[in-house]
Image (cartoon, helix red, strand yellow):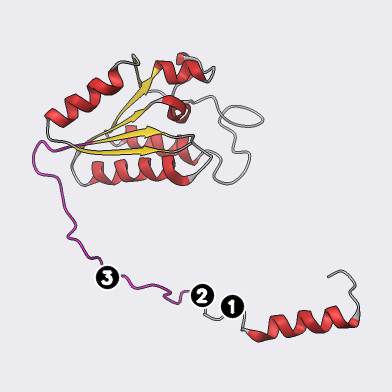
Amino acid sequence: MPAFDDEIMANIEKSVGEIPHPSQAKGTNLYGSTKIFPDYQASEGQSYLTLVHGIPHESSVSFVAVLQATRALRKGFDSALYFYGPGALACMDTRGFPTTGDVAFPGNQNMNDSVKTFIAEGGTVFCCRFGLALHGCREEDVIEGVIPCHPLDVQDAVIHYANKGAIINSVYNL
């Protein structure tokens, strides 16, 4: 700790002593665990569509959307992710530093890894070609298994899934 005068040191000791740190032992429950709603599972043929129009890696919104779509898939839903606008960046397999695939910092590849897991477990991923173009991304650089789509497909995909009676989750952030 840097050198402080006696008054500052006394205030530091007083501040640290006011509340025990940490006040709970590791492993202590801080929150209740009661689940309110039943653990619904998909009925035969049910679908779940998640639209993602958010900048991956800039907030948790896009990442949580992928996790929700994966959970729906694991509950038996025919689950699909549709990335459009800046969300298309989540489909890029050429991210990393200093080389593609490298993890520059913990969590740097969370989004890519989660999309790959979703595909590996049987999920369908659509990506808007216009969203890619808007951000200078090449179609040849998308994650294997991602289905590139025409920009007019976004609306028609929503109509398609709505006609099937799908649950539609749409996330959007700037």
Magenta stretch mostly in which secondary structure?
loop
Question: Under tag 2, what secondary structure?
Answer: loop
The answer to whether the residues at label 3 and label 2 have Cβ atoms under 8 Å apart is: no
- Which residue is under mark 1? 22
- Magenta-drawn segment: 26-48
The answer to whether the residues at label 2 and label 1 have Cβ atoms under 8 Å apart is: yes
Give the Cα distance between marks 3 and 2: 21 Å
Which amino acid, mark 3?
Answer: Thr
Q: Residue at x 76, y 83 (%)?
A: 13
Which amino acid, mark 1?
Answer: Pro
Crowding near the residue tagged with mark 2, few <14, some 14–19, many ≥20 C-alpha atoms within 10 Å: few
* Image quarter in which the N terminus is found: bottom right
Up the image or down, 43 lies above or below 123; here it is below
Q: Is residue 16 left or right of residue 161?
A: right
- Which residue is under mark 3? 34
Crowding near the residue tagged with mark 1, few <14, some 14–19, many ≥20 C-alpha atoms within 10 Å: few
Between circles 3 and 2, the one closer to the viewer is 3
Q: Whole-percent x and y of residue 34?
A: 27, 70
Q: Residue at x 49, y 34 (%)?
A: 55
Q: Is residue 122 left or right of residue 106?
A: left
Answer whether residue 16 is magenta in the image: no
Q: Is residue 13 left or right of residue 88?
A: right
Up the image or down, 67 lies above or below 89; here it is below
Q: Whole-percent x and y of residue 54?
A: 44, 35
Which picture quadrant has residue 169? top left
Question: Under tag 1, what secondary structure?
Answer: loop
Up the image or down, 82 lies above or below 111; here it is above
Q: Whole-percent x and y of residue 111?
A: 46, 38
- Which residue is under mark 2? 26
In-front residue for pair 84/145:
84
Question: Under tag 3, what secondary structure?
Answer: loop
Q: Residue at x 28, y 18 (%)?
A: 153
